[in-house]
Image: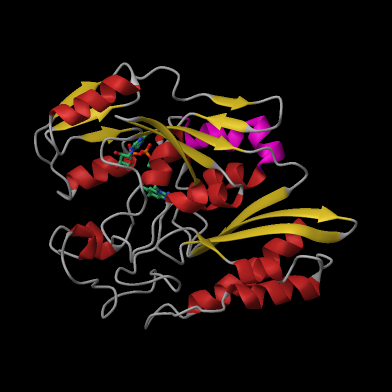
Amino acid sequence: MNRFELARAATTGQARELLAEKPASVLKAGGIDLLDHLKEHLIEPPRVVDLKSVRGLNTIAAEPDGSLRIGPLATLAQIAAHAAVRKAHAALAQACGEAASPQIRNVATLGGNVLQRPRCWYYRLESYKCLKKGGDVCYAVGGENRYHVIFGGGPSYAPHPSNAAVALVALGATFVLEGAKGSRSVPAGEFFTPASQDPERENQLGPDEILTEIRVPAAAGARSLYEEVRERAAFDWPLVSLAATLTLEAGSVKEARLVLGAVAPIPWRVPKAEQALVGKALDEASASAAARAATIGAAPLSDNGYKVGLVQTLVRRTLLSLA
Ligand SMILES: Cc1cc2nc3c(=O)[nH]c(=O)nc-3n(C[C@H](O)[C@H](O)[C@H](O)COP(=O)(O)OP(=O)(O)OC[C@H]3O[C@@H](n4cnc5c(N)ncnc54)[C@H](O)[C@@H]3O)c2cc1C
């Protein structure tokens, strides 16, 4: 990797100043994805600004109204083990608890997980100048694409890599971003940006902005679940994942939010599957109808047609587990 200066920020304001002082500098949280980028020469920043030295960014607060305020530096392990998160926002605890390995979860942060870059092997290899690196080709289209997207592809086909992002969209979370002009709040469902908007980015975080808080609204009677399918039981990224939140009233589904992961360049909400559930009892018939509706519009590449069947099975099974 290139030689760089390590700067430890005491406040988020100082972190932004340190970033702005030397163009192409980067922020570090746990450093898991960032160090991969440095080691693979995907980025060569003059300065790495460490956020771990900023106090108070790693708290998880369960508010009296049932909502959560989570600092971006809270680790995946802390969130997975947190009693209030597990009780009322199970999908988030499960998504964090399923990611990577115990060692990585002890270091990796929620903010870093949501902001990590795609795992596409063409993007990760220095020698391929793909669309995500300012090139003009997505090598997955005519190449090895068994882990790539079946929804929302084009011009880039790399799937969004974050478990936590899928759960946060399903739970209706909000991201608080701090920049030179102050703070702004962006709903998780709008934060992630489609590949067609700009293939070099996966979200709307500005170059001078820091993610300073993740707010999760009260569950208000909704139950949630996160499930994934991966090739091996040991640490691995999911082939497909699903976060579901459901509110039931008098035995039938009042509200449903289903979000798929690892199948699109962003966490992928499936409204037709949600509609297949609303007003119905949560049973084999409605779960199967939702499972079929979840893959309407799927457009697999040459090697990933298997994801269509996997999504259907995962949706059906997860809904029946929630029932
Ligand atoms: C073997 C292995 C298996 C894995 N399996 C999974 C998996 O199954 N599911 C999954 O979701 N992930 C998986 N991961 C990815 C891992 O969880 C992420 O790399 C990690 O969560 C990133 O968090 P971090 O704190 O280390 O982020 P960093 O590497 O420090 O940062 C990541 C990016 O976010 C930016 N950033 C971080 N915090 C902020 C902030 N507050 N404001 C603005 N920008 C910020 C950084 O500049 C950088 O660009 C795996 C990783 C490995 C190595």
State the extent of the magenta-drawn residues as a range: 74-89
Q: Residue at x 45, y 33 (%)?
A: 106
Please, which residue is most extreme toward the front here? 181
Direction from residue 183 to residue 143 in the image, left or right: left
Direction from residue 181 to residue 132 in the image, left or right: left
Q: Is residue 270 at least partly visible in the picture? A: yes
Q: Is residue 323 at least partly visible in the picture? A: no
Please, which residue is most extreme toward the right here? 250
Percent coordinates x, y for residue 271 in the rendering: 61, 67
Percent coordinates x, y for residue 236 in the rendering: 44, 55
User: Quarter of the image containing the C terminus?
Assistant: bottom right
Percent coordinates x, y for residue 41 in the rendering: 14, 48
Ligand 1, what quadrant? top left
Magenta stretch encompasses residue 212 = no
Q: Nearer the viewer, residue 193 or 265?
A: 193
- What secondary structure characterizes most of the magenta part? helix
Which image quadrant for residue 153? bottom left
Is the residue 233 above or below the residue 91 in the image?
below
Direction from residue 25 to residue 285 in the image, left or right: right
Colour convention = secondary structure
User: Quarter of the image containing the N terminus?
Assistant: top left
Percent coordinates x, y for residue 220 in the rendering: 75, 41
Is the residue 72 above or below the residue 291 in the image?
above
